[in-house]
């Protein structure tokens, strides 16, 4: 049996990041952790492209455009949806997650989803560094896995 090992070597990978500007403090924390982890894994700064969008619902369209460009080995979605007093939280959380997943399935480009969905600002701040770092690792691992599978 051939087993494909986890590969977290980012050298030569081209990574696209789409970041929401809503909930700025959290999104900047996600981005900082993500970029640091990408660089730690060997992804060159010149091979990282960042696009920002107004909010979480706009992330999938920018991801789709990047995926269809065929310029990226993997993509990363960064955002934060924090519960408020209305049903809007559920709509934004569910639709952004569904559409992010649809991009990777439709285009065959892996997308690491680091759109936080939390009840409070404090929860989002507590999770932003871990989730940003994890998203970088997921993107690298999946890009390398798809290379090995094809």
Image (cartoon, grey):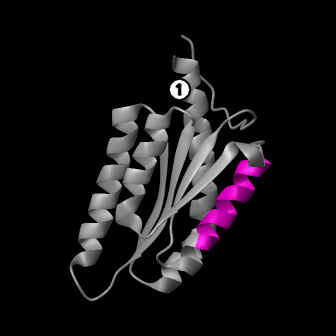
**Mark 1 neighbour density, 10 Å: few (under 14) some (14–19) many (20 or more):** some
Tell me if residue 110 can be seen. Answer: no
Residue located 67% across and 48% down the image: 48
Which of the 4 image quadrants contains residue 5?
A: top right
Instruction: Say what secondary structure mark 1 lies in.
Output: helix
Counting from the top left corner in percent of width and height, residue 70 is at: 51, 32
In-front residue for pair 4/25: 25
Counting from the top left corner in percent of width and height, residue 4 is at: 59, 22
Per the image, is 45 magenta?
no
In the image, farthest residue toward the top: 1
Counting from the top left corner in percent of width and height, residue 61 is at: 37, 52
> Which contiguous range is marked in magenta?
28-40
In-front residue for pair 85/56: 56
Residue located 29% across and 75% down the image: 89
In-front residue for pair 63/8: 63
**Figure label count:** 1
In the image, farthest residue toward the bottom: 85
Asked if residue 58 lies left or right of residue 32, the reply is left
Main secondary structure found in the magenta portion: helix
Asked if residue 125 lies left or right of residue 100, the reply is right
> Label 1, on which residue?
146
> Relative to 123, does residue 130 appear above or below in the rendering?
above
Counting from the top left corner in percent of width and height, residue 115 is at: 45, 63
In the image, farthest residue toward the left: 87
Residue located 25% across and 77% down the image: 88
Q: Which quarter of the image is occupied by the N terminus?
A: top right
> Relative to 34, does residue 104 appear above or below in the rendering?
above
Which of the 4 image quadrants contains residue 144?
A: top right
Asked if residue 23 lies left or right of residue 143, the reply is left
> Relative to 41, does residue 131 appear above or below in the rendering?
below
Per the image, is 30 magenta?
yes
């Amino acid at each position: 049996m051939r087993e494909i090992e986890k590969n977290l070597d980012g050298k030569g990978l081209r990574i696209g990041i789409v970041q929401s500007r809503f909930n700025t403090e959290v999104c900047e924390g996600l981005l900082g952790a993500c970029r640091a982890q990408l660089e730690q894994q060997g992804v060159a700064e010149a091979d990282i492209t960042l696009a920002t969008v107004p909010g979480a619902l706009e992330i999938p369209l920018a991801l789709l455009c990047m995926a269809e460009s065929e310029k990226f080995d993997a993509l990363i979605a960064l955002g934060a949806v924090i519960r408020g007093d209305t049903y809007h939280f559920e709509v934004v959380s569910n639709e952004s997650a569904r559409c992010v997943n649809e991009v990777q399935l439709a285009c065959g480009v892996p997308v690491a989803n680091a759109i936080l969905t939390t009840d409070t600002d404090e929860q989002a701040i507590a999770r932003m560094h871990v989730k940003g770092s994890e998203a970088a690792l997921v993107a690298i691992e999946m890009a390398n896995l798809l290379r090995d599978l094809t």
